[in-house]
Image (spheres, rainbow, N blue to C red):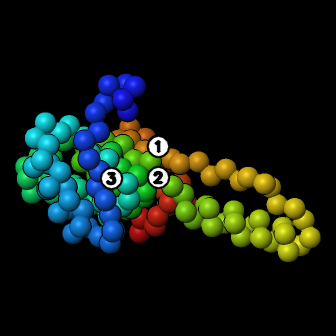
Amino acid sequence: MDEVGIKMTTTLESKNFTIDEAVSQTKNIVTANPGLVCLWAHHSQATLGTVSALNELGLQDKVLVAAFDGDPDIVDYLQNGKVLVCGAQQPKKMGRESVTALKTHFDGGTPQKEIPVPVLLLTKDNVMANLDAIEKDVCGLK
């Protein structure tokens, strides 16, 4: 971050991984850093809590939110601008690939040493085009 001139001031430190924890920490971070322009939420509950706190503080249009992890609500948040970008892991695909590797092993074969499962980079511009992948590999939308 330093290389591109971005100053990181603090981090949201999850202990319980709850929305309430994220709301409280987000409010503290925003209060301590009045010039804040962006928050990165590193798991679904942090994203949901961060968006909630920014809405409560009336800062939803002033502070950008970048997210990691996938949650059905984040699809809506991307569409309506509450979240700028989300790196979404594909846990369902990870599970399927793991089971396939185990079956290969137990069938006497040798599974691949590495099985890449890329993170989807979701934005307002591409989230709708990725709904099938989100449903199948990230989180159930229904």
Q: In the structure shown, which secondary structural element does the residue marked by tag 1 occupy?
A: strand
Whole-percent x, y for residue 12 in the image = 28, 55
Residue bearing the label numbered 3: 41
Do callouts 2 and 1 mark residues in contact (Cβ within 8 Å)?
Answer: yes
User: On the rendered structure, is 133 left or right of 76?
Assistant: right
Residue at 14 percent across and 43 percent down: it is 33
Above or below, comparing residue 98 to residue 39 in the picture = below
Q: Position of residue 22 (x, y in %)?
A: 24, 62
Quarter of the image for the C terminus: give it. bottom left
Farthest right residue in view: 108
Q: Quadrant of residue 92?
A: bottom right
Tell me which label, 2 or 1, sits earlier in the chain: 2
Question: In percent of the image, x 42 and y 58: which residue is there?
Answer: 70
Circle 1 residue: 121
Check disc 2 and report the residue beneath it.
88
Query: Quick one: SS at disc 2?
Result: strand
Q: Is any atom of residue 127 visible in this view?
A: no
Label 1, label 3: how many angstroms apart (C-alpha)? 14 Å
Q: Amino acid at mark 3?
A: Ala
Q: Position of residue 9 (x, y in %)?
A: 25, 41
What residue sits 23% from the left and 67% below the top? 21
Q: Residue 86 got which mark?
A: none
* Mark 3 residue crowding within 10 angstroms, few (<14) / some (14–19) / many (20+): many
- Rate crowding at label 1 as few (under 14), some (14 to 19) or many (20 or more) other CA atoms within 10 Å: some
Q: What is the quadrant of residue 125 in the picture?
A: top left
Q: Give the Cα distance between marks 2 and 1.
A: 6 Å
